[in-house]
Amino acid sequence: MSQNRIALDYPQASLDAIDAALAVLDTEFANLIGLSPDERRQLMKMGDKSEAFCRQAVVVFSENSGVLPRNFDLDGYLADLKALDVLRPRLARVQRLFERMADSEMALGSDLMAGSLEGYAVLKVAGKGAGLEGLRQMLSNRFSRKARTVAPEPGGTSVSNG
């Protein structure tokens, strides 16, 4: 195989440890929520400037809690800021790990495709007459193109591009 960007081989003990760690994460992060795409669109977002505003507001609100309306939950507000500060570094670690996992998955897929194409090319040439025609034909289905139907012409008939 001419391409080998990555080689992974996890012993079963490592896979068991990884699965156990993921189970712990699932358990410990059970109170995290999931949002629908519509909910994400509707939520007010906090960017860098907005975060600076919120952090300044925490100081002002904490020092002047008497001017806030009675129904303003200052303790809940402060708890949200604390939770954000606790969650962010862990999110960054998980995002870095996710990116490496996704890149590794892509590299493994690329290695497999490159090896498959390389082997298929050899099979097309060297496999003739070696009783491999059926297998070569099966692999060739990846490259078969079905006729595309184009929109009907003004006369009402459709045209097939094949």
Image: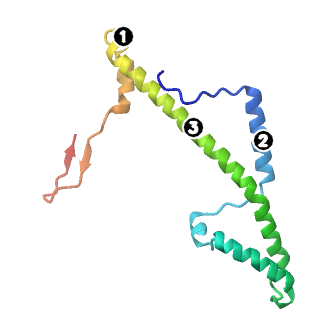
Residue 145 horizontal side relative to residue 75, left or right: left
User: Across the whole image, how many numbered discs are drawn on residues?
Assistant: 3
The coloring applied to the image is: rainbow
Label 1, label 3: how many angstroms apart (C-alpha)? 34 Å
132 up-or-down from 4: above or below: above
CB atoms at circles 1 and 3 under 8 Å apart? no
The relative height of residue 33 versus residue 22 in the rendered view (above or below) is below
Residue occupying the point 64% across, 46% down: 98
Q: Is residue 46 visible?
A: no
In this view, the mark in front (2 or 1): 2
Q: Residues within 10 Å of mark 2 (few under 14, many from 20)?
A: few
Quick one: quadrant of the C terminus?
A: top left
Residue at x 75% of width, y 74% of height: 55
- Mark 3 belongs to which amino acid? Glu
Residue at numbered disc 3: 105
Residue labelled with disc 1: 131
User: Who comes first in sequence, dot 2 or dot 3?
Assistant: 2
Q: Amino acid at mark 1?
A: Gly
Q: Could you tell me which secondary element the residue under label 2 belongs to?
A: helix
Q: Of the residues shown, which amino acid type is indicated by label 2?
A: Ala
Tag 3 secondary structure: helix
Residue 120, image x and y in percent? 39, 22
Q: Is residue 133 left or right of residue 96?
A: left
The residue where tag 2 is placed is 21
Q: Which mark is residue 147?
A: none
